[in-house]
Image (cartoon, rainbow, N blue to C red):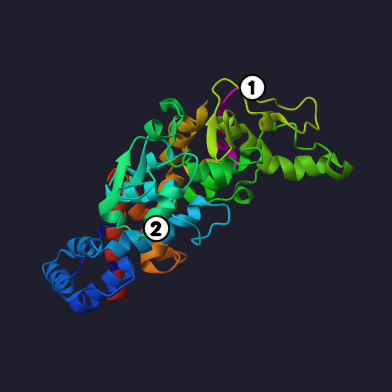
Amino acid sequence: MKKRLLILATLVISHSWAGPKEQAWKLHNRLTGVPPKKAVFDQMVNQINAGRPEEAAELAMENPNFYNVVLKNWIKPWSNRERTSRTDLNDYVATVIGVVRDKVPFTQVLHSDILYTVNGATPTYSYANNDHYKNAESRNLNLKDNLVKQTQSSLTGLPTEAVAGVITTRASGEAFFSAGTNRRVNRFIFMNYLCKDYEELHDVTIPDFRVRGDVERKPGGDARTYKNKCVGCHAGQDALGGAYAYYDFVSGRLNYTPGTVVTKMNHNVYHPDAFVTKDDSWLNLWAMGQNAKLGWRGNTSGNGARAIGQMFSQSKAFSLCLTSKVYQLVCMKAPTHADDKAAVESLAQQFEQDNYNLKNLIVNTSVGCIADEDE
């Protein structure tokens, strides 16, 4: 057990590994979904024999399948309500893939003025439709070579202060800002980047002074239902929801109206004394009580989508969640056992120390898992 944890924690491949050829084959298949070509395979074996398994993994990731298939299908479910990979490539998915390829600090996916387009795809990028990315996917353009990093503000017409990484991409607007009351935006951030759904955050001890008027105080005629159930989710989520008060997905694009709260934030008022959203301020009431364990760091209150994206990405839960997702991707198992959880904790710490480099996290995790399997 101790040796196993040491290998995973330090991410060093041991010369006691049985069969560098088997290890190279496993690494390539895990990272690309296809077997390696002979020249690449031989290079990977040489790197492993030389005690450089990370370089072997990097060689495997040069294969276009790593970006065009493995990463794309892994990330697609984050961009839609159905959480399915059976959807088109879009600006959300392309941006996450680009951030991984370029080793941009992964925290930036939730708050930076960043967006990736695809060189050679026609028509050019439009904030009003997804044709650019559909074309890139239908033509199977190599994302590794053709993704182009751009600023979101220059392409979407949103002011710089209004853009927040993938939160304000067109795909996110269509999936999470359309209809509803913008509550689903944070719910999917929690699920995708903190690995928690609202039911897991349920805490009836949180004060309910920010709960909106569309939440009934006596559902079914019984106020106890509100206090014992509804408050558990709404007190926390509604306090955060003001971050998106100026956003609405209308006519195929995400609109931003600074200083003007969109109507849907305050409609269906069942309780006249309820909180009324008047600006884009937000509070993280889940930073106290049982949900303090998510490891909130930095500001837990602020204004707008960019500030709330920064808060989410600075949390310990963000690092642990992404590491757990990567672990499941390349180790092909959930980290349910104690030693797996210890490995994820160690990898998450290194992920933070490595300036949130997700590509390196994938490399280190895959190497550690293969080493563990071949002890």
- Relative depth, front residue between 283 and 71: 71
Query: x, y (%) of residue 320?
Result: 42, 51
The disc placed on residue 137 is 2
Are the residues tagged 2 and 1 within 8 Å (C-beta)? no
Tell me the quadrant of the picture where the C terminus can be found: bottom left
Q: Which residues are magenta?
A: 278-290
The disc placed on residue 278 is 1
Query: x, y (%) of residue 246?
Result: 57, 28
Q: Amino acid at mark 2?
A: Glu
Q: Is residue 148 left or right of residue 261?
A: left
Q: Is residue 361 left or right of residue 275?
A: left
Q: Residues within 10 Å of mark 2 (few under 14, many from 20)?
A: some
Check residue 87 for magenta coloring: no
Residue at figure coordinates x 20%, y 74% from the top left: 37
- Relative depth, front residue between 166 and 192: 166
Q: Amino acid at mark 1?
A: Lys
Q: Secondary structure at mark 2?
A: helix
CA distance for labels 2 and 1: 42 Å
Query: x, y (%) of residue 29?
Result: 30, 72
Asked where in the image residue 331 lies, by quadrant, the reply is bottom left
Residue at figure coordinates x 53%, y 38% from the top left: 253
The disc placed on residue 42 is none
Q: Does residue 186 lie above or below 10 as drawn? A: above
Asked where in the image residue 160 lies, by quadrant, the reply is top left
Q: Does residue 153 lie above or below 119 as drawn? A: above
